[in-house]
Amino acid sequence: MTVAMDVVQLETDVLVIGSGAAGMMAALEAGKEGAGVILADRSLIGRSGATIMAQMTVAVALGSQTPDSWEHHLADTLAAGRELCDASLSQLVCEEGPRDILQLDEWKVGWARNDDGSIRQALAPGHDRPRCVYVDFLSTGPAVAKTLRGRVLRQKEVARIGDLYITDVLVTDGVATGAAGFSLADGRPVMVKAKAVVIATGGLTRLYQRNSASANMGGDGYALALRAGAELTDMEFVQFFPIGHLAPRLVGMDPIMWDPFRYKLGGRLLNAEMREFVNDYGNEEAGTYNVTRDRATFAILSEVKAGRGSPAGGAYLSFQHIPAETLRASFGPVIDRLAANGIDLTRMPIEVAPIAHYHMGGVKVDARMRTSVPGLFSCGEANGGSNGANRLSGNAITEAFVFGRTAGRTAALHARAAGNADAPVPAGALDLVSAVAPEHGENHAGLIAELQQVMSVDVGPFRTEDGLNKALAAIAVLKTRVGALPPGAPGPYNMARLDWFDLRTMLLVAEAVTRSALARKESRGAHQRDDFPAMDPAFVLHHTVKLAGDDIVLGRAPVEGHTLCEVA
Amino acid sequence: MRETATLIVRRGNAGEDAPTSSYEVPYTPGQSVLDGLRFVRAHLDATLSIRHSCISANTCKECMIIVDGKVDYACTARLEPREMVLEPLGNKAHLRDLVTEITPPDERMEHALKSGLGKVVAGA
Ligand SMILES: Cc1cc2nc3c(=O)[nH]c(=O)nc-3n(C[C@H](O)[C@H](O)[C@H](O)COP(=O)(O)OP(=O)(O)OC[C@H]3O[C@@H](n4cnc5c(N)ncnc54)[C@H](O)[C@@H]3O)c2cc1C
Ligand code: FES
């Protein structure tokens, strides 16, 4: 049932959905092109996605301390992607990354410096030389978010609207013409007419029970794109961060904070027998800790499966061989925050295990960030393709910058040329957000937790046909339990309704991941099938996902731009 | 015997009297108040509204509430096996339950409407 209710109608040239690094870059660039921009976020502008949580590395071939060029960066990116990168997208990230890093430097983000004043570059796994810039330890994301937010505040073409939850992209005659959603503060339905729409909503790691990301990362952009008629690619590739914090419980600190500790001090990964094991799986760490994420994840989970895991079900990470003074010299106040959590690294190992962290797959775009729907663009982690089957550390923020800027520009140019300013609003556009329904018996927050459990058990880093089929069956049951309408009536910060919209999205996206994983009968990068443990050349292809009515349809697309592998 | 924490939570929409709900949640050492509130939402009462996004990283600053009379972040305040009184911030406009209006004024819908980006129309 819908009742008469006030509706907010907004109008702009470019609507950017999501205000992480990608969204803020897109808004800045579109504004620079002279477009009027609405930058919308379901939470606070610039504070609520993965960007502000990022800890450390931003990969970019600056060559500021070791000679480097974007071709080397590209070669490493393609190698990590295990033949599945869309090389035109990877190239864009590697070639244009330096420009954005220097732009951020000019905006005073505070990249760490060497004594000679050059921008410092650290070595991270999978990179052939020191290539990652950062802002102090554990502060890169906050610094990037704050700097971009500061710029957005000064860009007069950009209007910021927080607490605006976008639920659907509006499509008229196959063209994106705006979006529908609701204002969280009062529950009012909102319609935004726009000549161009940019998806910048980040990833999907909230689908998993243990994840490193924020509550806003349930894959909203993927569902928005699918329902608008756009295509997704590589949805089976969910990246697990190998050494996510597991035990003892740590409060107020990020679960993936151990990476810099390990690089800097050489933390030892041990099994229940207190033996280092990563090299047992064909890796050669040799004290450099540069094993890529998929390989480290595989090693840890294999030990757990073999019964050699730590008590909480992971591996031990030990710094007991490092003197207390060295620990403090390297990590200063972080050591005190750990102590407040009852953790003394000189006396005890902690437990770590893979944790859902990033999504390689996503909206399929071309090198100008155009989706298959005219007027609809996408950028940042919401996109698929540039990282293939596995992402190198540090590439995600660079990608958010470059893709964001590109999308902003393309969208502004499109808006300038677009003739859809007076497109009629599709019928029923606001039906869901203004629906009033009985509070039906289900607890949607509980159902979300159930879905997260299903995904973790059966669609985690290790997959089998049986498990994936089990997950599909569970998702189908959950779908029937969700109900067709959000419960209750629109009102101020009604979280029960918000959960319903989140679940609607998460179930669609979970199904896209699971179906793609079922179709990929091989193991490659972040996608590991116990029943098909080897890489299979027949699967050098992308799985694509579209929606036909309510049904997910899988397709296949060739991998483009292989020849570029020879560039470097 | 399993220990529990009792969360006494101020409920209701803006301008309403201040009823409270009391919830018993299982306690294990190391948990945060937000862990307790999320347990309530998933297992006991999904209508309880709280605000958070980063969950435990303490970067988003959305989960600020009053814990036992003192302003604190729900995601870093420790859950304790006793009665704990949780209230919305007193110095911000109240929206619902533990949620207050913390969006900067020029990033609210009202501001967008005032600056001419759109209008409010009566719905069908
Ligand atoms: C803990 C952590 C550490 C990381 N560390 C690193 C690192 O060191 N180096 C690196 O390169 N990468 C790192 N990453 C990955 C990287 O941070 C992300 O890939 C990147 O920041 C994504 O940027 P984005 O702008 O695409 O999305 P996000 O920053 O996630 O922003 C998405 C925004 O969209 C909003 N949104 C979502 N849905 C909707 C909707 N329906 N309506 C309105 N708004 C919506 C969200 O609220 C959010 O603000 C890390 C990630 C995490 C979680
Ligand atoms: S949930 Fe982000 S600061 Fe508490």
Image: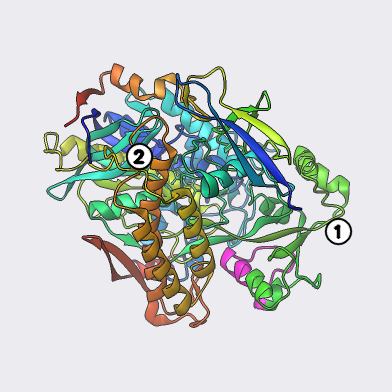
Write down the chain letter for disc 1.
A
Rendering colour mode: rainbow
Tell me the distance, in whole angstroms, between the alpha carbons under discs 1 and 2: 57 Å
Which residue corresponds to mark 2? Answer: A488
Q: Amino acid at mark 1?
A: His
The residue carrying mark 1 is A321
Say if residue A283 shows up in the picture: no
In this rendering, position of residue A367 left or right of residue B20: left
Q: Is residue B73 above or below residue A233?
A: above
Ligand 1: does it lie within 8 Å of the C-beta at label 2?
no
Residue A158 position by quadrant: top left
**Is A518 in front, or is A37?**
A518
Q: Secondary structure at mark 2?
A: loop
Q: Is residue A517 above or below residue A145?
A: below
* Residue ID at (27%, 50%): A370
What segment is highlighted magenta in the picture? A281-298
